[in-house]
Image (tube, rainbow, N blue to C red):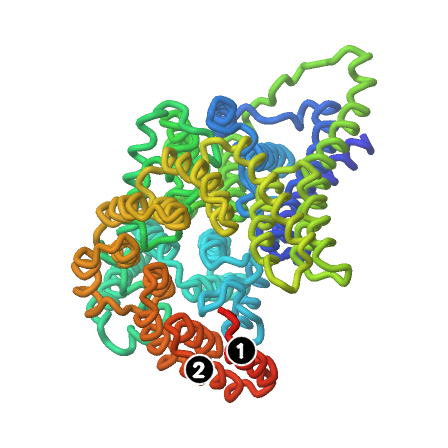
Amino acid sequence: MALNNFLRNSVVVGIFALPFIPLFVSSELFFPFISGKNFAFRILIELMAAAYLLLAFRDASYRPKRTWMLVAYAAFMLIIAVADVFGENFYRSFWSNYERMEGLIAHLHFFAYFVMAGTVLTTEKLWTRFWQTSIFVSALLGFYGIFQLSGRFDIHQGGVRLDATLGNATYLAAYMLFHAFITALLFAREAAGSKMRWVYGALIALQLFILYYTATRGAMLGLLGGGVVVAALAFFLNRGDRRVRKLAAGAIAAVIVLAGGVYLFKDTSFVRESPVLSRFASISLSETTTKSRFLIWNMSLEGVKEHPLLGYGQENYIIVFNKQYDPRMYAQEPWFDRAHNVFFDWLIAGGILGLLAYLSLFGVALYYLLVRDRDSFSAAEKSIFIGLLAAYFFQNVFVFDNFTSYFLFASVLAYLAFRAEGTTAPALAPSFAPPPAVARLFAPAVLVTTLLVLYFANVRPIMAGATLIEALSPHQEGLGKNLELFEKSIAYGTFGRGEAREQLIQAAIRVQTPAAPVEVRQRFFETARREMLIHIDENPKDARYELFLGSFLNKFGMYDEALAHLERARELSPKKQSILFETASSYLGKREYTKALALLKEAYELEPSFVEARLLYGMGALYARNDALAAELLVPAYGTLLIPDDRVINAYAARGEYGKVAELWKLRIQAEPNNINYHGALAASYFKMGRVSESIAALRKISAIEPSLKEQVEDLVRRIQAGENVF
């Protein structure tokens, strides 16, 4: 019995430790605001699960309760697991990456937490203490946000949107959204005049204040929508209480007035100059972010047609994004691994079955609140919980989930199941009695399994991430040490090797300078190329990596090999302009200007409003000596063919028209008169034209701007005067 109490208390202590994880930031890990929290959560859950398994094995009363919520959650897990196994890339679906830390492994941990919380927190008092603990942590994050607002702490994303220790304003907004409703629940339970009402009221004000200053539109709209739901339910569920009904009606009116006021005064200086109000006032169907959401949702619908029942598996949204890419997305970030809509995310990850299974969690929650037992929840509790679910549902239309929202949602589901069924639901396998031999081996098996899971699921990925951070840092031993650390991080063989390879290929480009030894530069190149080839083999349907490698090879003049990868990228994502641009760059390097021009034309015609595509198409026309086409494209947009852009300058240089090149460098110098590189380029242009005296004059401008370079400049001048070809 003493052992059972110890095991139970260990699980309870672990559950009460979990709300503190949002405070944790690990600067020694890649994506410190995400990976550190998730690893901490997983390690705690695994240790708790070991204690819980032993407890449930010994005492049937602690076995999972056969509730409708458990059935729905288990069905969701089963469908998503099947979707992952039969999806496009099971390894990626299971492990995810450092940036997201999601995948099947994360959801197995959330499910384990749901089961443990629902069976170990068996009294209302314990649940109240749990919610109070989580609210306390939200207050700490709130004060952190205030310090950010005052300028004492940095905002990690930059700008003015608070992110606290979550590192992302959207994540903080979702966190505060949940806690505002949970705190309102505890507020509603307190008797009128209670001192705790003042405490909870102040905390709600703090949470809403921080939520507002995250300037996250999806969460704010969710809050307003959820608030209206709470007020409407309070109005209809309290027919005998005129005071409550008046307050509810007033709250609805206040929301309408507030939203209308922001819209009506959106063009006033007060709204425009507010970094928060201006974001809310900019919401419209024509706003860039809104339009991009509709585009990406349409891409998702097209993608799910190919895998309607079980989708693509988790973390494979990028495959849909590549194949269904809409060229009108050019103004957005280059790669989307989420639909920025939870429902489309699950539709892609798990198909129609996965989405229905996810929605069933909301359905069972509403069943508990409205149907199963009308006396299980008070009118206030029903209103607040349904409002919370509505707010969370609505914000999920515009964003994707993260660790904190998953954790809080699982907590709410476990609590609702406890309130509705916890005291009456039977335990699974209540009479199961294992054979003595199994009983003796069970504890050692749990211990060994836990240690193996801890090592392979956490310790090795943590070591790989920490090593990657080291690889990105300067070392006294030189760049060779950095390369050694890159290789070490990859050699751990964890899901972090994808990020390590991406960082390695960028590092291999950065080290290509005269300051780095030739041998080191060559080793970086060979290692990056080899590792990216391996990564492409592991992710054969991801156009990103084909593009990364093709672009990398272009920089080293390996155009034929680059084209092989870029053509494969085009097969995977035929309408993505950046792939067409890079493929054209290969042909420009090979001096096959007609082929380059055809590709640039294709990119431009995909979306003529893309200014960059117009410029590059015009540049391609210059390379191909089709000046009429170049004028047709560039003059209406720029008023001239002499555009001081490096790519246009290179086009004229390739044509040998150094007079135009010199004119363009003069324009660049007018904008930045003290840029010595521009003066050097102008000197080279004059030299190519045989205008030696003007070349020397341009060089001597460099020493006038930077006297420390006078000796080098004069050396060049002497060599020019001696007839050497120094350019």
Asked where in the image residue 707 lies, by quadrant, the reply is bottom right
Is 249 rendered above or below residue 526? below
Q: Which residue is mark 2?
A: 698
Local secondary structure at mark 1 = loop
In the displayed orientation, state which residue is furthest to the front.
722
Residue 185 visible in the shown view: no
Asked where in the image residue 453 lies, by quadrant, the reply is top right
- Image mark for residue 722: 1
Give the percent coordinates (x, y) of residue 276.
Answer: 37, 68
User: Residue at the spot x=51%, y=89% of the render?
Assistant: 704
Which dot, 2 or 1, sits closer to the camera?
A: 1
Q: Which three-letter amino acid code belongs to the residue tagged 2?
A: Ala
Q: Nearer the viewer, residue 205 or 107?
A: 107
Q: Nearer the viewer, residue 676 or 603?
A: 676
Q: Is residue 409 left or right of residue 715?
A: left
Q: Label 2 neighbourhood size at 10 Å, few (<14), some (14-19), many (20+)?
A: many
Mark 2 to mark 1 CA distance (whole Å) = 18 Å
